[in-house]
Image: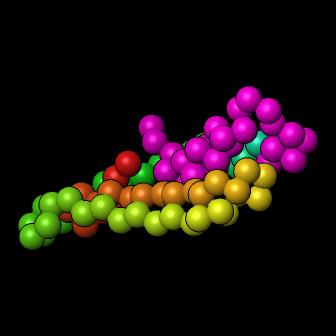
Amino acid sequence: MTRPDISHSVAYFACFNSNPGPEHWKALKHLFHYVKGTADHKLTYQGNLASNELFLTYTDASHGDCVDTGRFTAGFVTMMAGRAIE
């Protein structure tokens, strides 16, 4: 099972593995509560295979977005036959 709805949060938390602060733990507990409440959610893939472009990828970045480190954050989504995949 894949959880693209939490992938950005998980990647962001990974930046603080070596030295998490109290605010990181609080946010992580919030994420766990969200995951527990949405455990029965799932993705159903029904792509349009007749599409002219089989794969498309979109990216976005925010430079200096992280207030703790000043580093940038980035994300992407890959589309297959008109539907998002991970």
Q: Position of residue 75 (x, y in %)?
A: 48, 57
> On the rendered image, what quadrant is the N terminus found in?
top left
Image coloring type: rainbow
Which residue lies most toward the right here? 22
Q: Residue furthest bottom?
A: 52
Is residue 56 in the magenta section?
no
Position in image of residue 44 (x %, y %): 36, 53
Residue 40 shows up from this direction = yes
Q: Is residue 15 magenta?
A: yes
Considering every residue shown, the one lying at the far top of the view is 18
The residue drawn where x is 34% and y is 52% is: 85
Q: Quadrant of residue 48?
A: bottom left
Q: Is residue 70 left or right of residue 46?
A: right
Left or right, residue 83 beside residue 7: left
- Residue drawn 58% across the image and 44% down it: 11
Where 20 sits versus 30, above or below? above
Q: Quadrant of residue 54?
A: bottom left
Q: Residue at x 90, y 41 (%)?
A: 22
Counting labels gives 0
In x, y percent, where is residue 31? Answer: 72, 47
Depth check, front residue: 62 or 28: 62
Q: Residue at x 77, y 42 (%)?
A: 28
Picture quadrant of residue 80:
bottom left
Q: Which residues are magenta?
A: 1-27
Q: Is residue 31 left or right of residue 9?
A: right
Task: From the viewer's side, name the closer residue of 15 and 53.
Answer: 15
Q: Is residue 27 left or right of residue 84?
A: right
**Is any atom of residue 36 visible in this view?**
no
Image spot of residue 16 (x, y percent): 72, 38
